[in-house]
Image: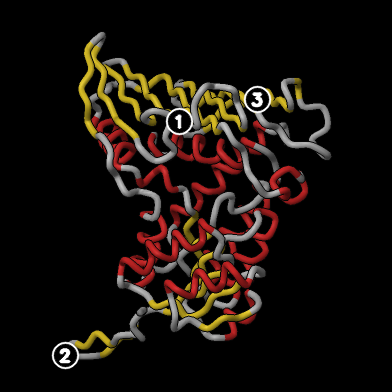
Amino acid sequence: MVQQAVLKTNSESSVARPRVGFLGVGWIGRHRMQAILGTGAVDVAAIADPSPDMVTEAGTLAPDAQRVSSLDDILDLGVDGVVIATPSALHAEQSIRALERGVAVFCQKPLGRTEAEVQAVVDAARKADRLLCVDLSYRFTEGMRRIREIINSGELGHVYAVDLVFHNAYGPDKQWFYDPALSGGGCVMDLGVHLVDLALWTLNNPGVGSVTGKLFAGGAPLKDSASQVEDYAVATVELDTGSVVQLACSWRLQAGCDAIISATFYGTQGGVSLRNVNGSFYDFTTERYWGTSRETLTSPPDEWGGRAAADWASRLATGERFDPAADHLVSVAKVLDRIYGR
């Protein structure tokens, strides 16, 4: 059972745990709910989803939460935060609506389909002075944390090349992913967003110079982005530091395994790489390179999937307001727009 709001008492005052609503409780929404509940930092106040079955399943995790029908119903309960796991086309509008009501937001990626949508959400969060975070979960793997620490320490010297890959052998199972108006794009919007985020976040948000991309659908160059989405993409991003980032992502690539995921950073004094193990979506190993030698830094298991959500909940509970790091989300969206030629 999920406990009712607990009062934490000290000599001066008593403070109730923040109350959080969940909008969308499919697999990803329920997984994030479980991670957030695991922090003990917040209470689940409300659940909304068009599927009664999904609501029932989520209710087993949070039996005391109210079952409601919409975002407005959640907001009308006076919640402190909302977790949004709905189709991509709804993210920006729903996030802005919550922020304008003074409610903090944790949203699935992408936060918006375009730079303009993402900028509007960040502006709303800044105006409302509320915490805004997006589920860019690969940052929270132990491997990427170690990689960022190593790069920031200067051990690699000048990092001049970054190679990033995310190939998913299956592709999404919901039809809206394949409608450009609803999704904002195909595998770049779905998977490439993680790659761009990892590159910019790991390198401490350098300025971006030129961006070029090539999009494919069904093995041929994408011809009509208004009616179809890409299922394979390659892109090159040149940074103001002189470094170059190359990325590739796809759905349903015939690569002989479930997934190929990697993030490799090459510097003048060595390299470091995160790679998935045996085609897994969840298990990663991290290695440090010197010439032809290598050292393993991290190995599975690593329960990283819900850490971004748990981090948001913990920060919400400590009273954090708007974090200017949200501007990074706009930088990522700007690169995606340029890959798409927008």
Q: Residue 135, labelled with which disc?
A: none
Q: As shown in the figure, which amino acid type bears the numbered disc 2? A: Ser
Q: Quadrant of the N terminus?
A: bottom left
Q: Residue at x 54, y 73 (%)?
A: 56
Residue 293 percent across, percent down from the top left: 22, 12
Query: Which mark sits nearer the N-terminus, 2 or 1?
Result: 2
Dot 2: element: loop
Q: Residues within 10 Å of mark 1 (few under 14, many from 20)?
A: many
Residue 286 vertical position relative to residue 189 in the rendered view, above or below: above
Q: At label 3, which amino acid type do we have?
A: Gly
**For residue 332, what is the image quadrant?**
top right
Residue with the mark numbered 3: 213
Is residue 264 depicted above or below 13 in this figure?
Answer: above
Judged from the image, the secondary structure of the residue bearing numbered disc 3 is: strand
Q: What separation in Å lies between label 2 and label 1 (alpha carbons)?
A: 50 Å
Q: Which residue is mark 1?
A: 261
For disc 2, the marked residue is 11
Q: Position of residue 5 (x, y in %)?
A: 35, 85
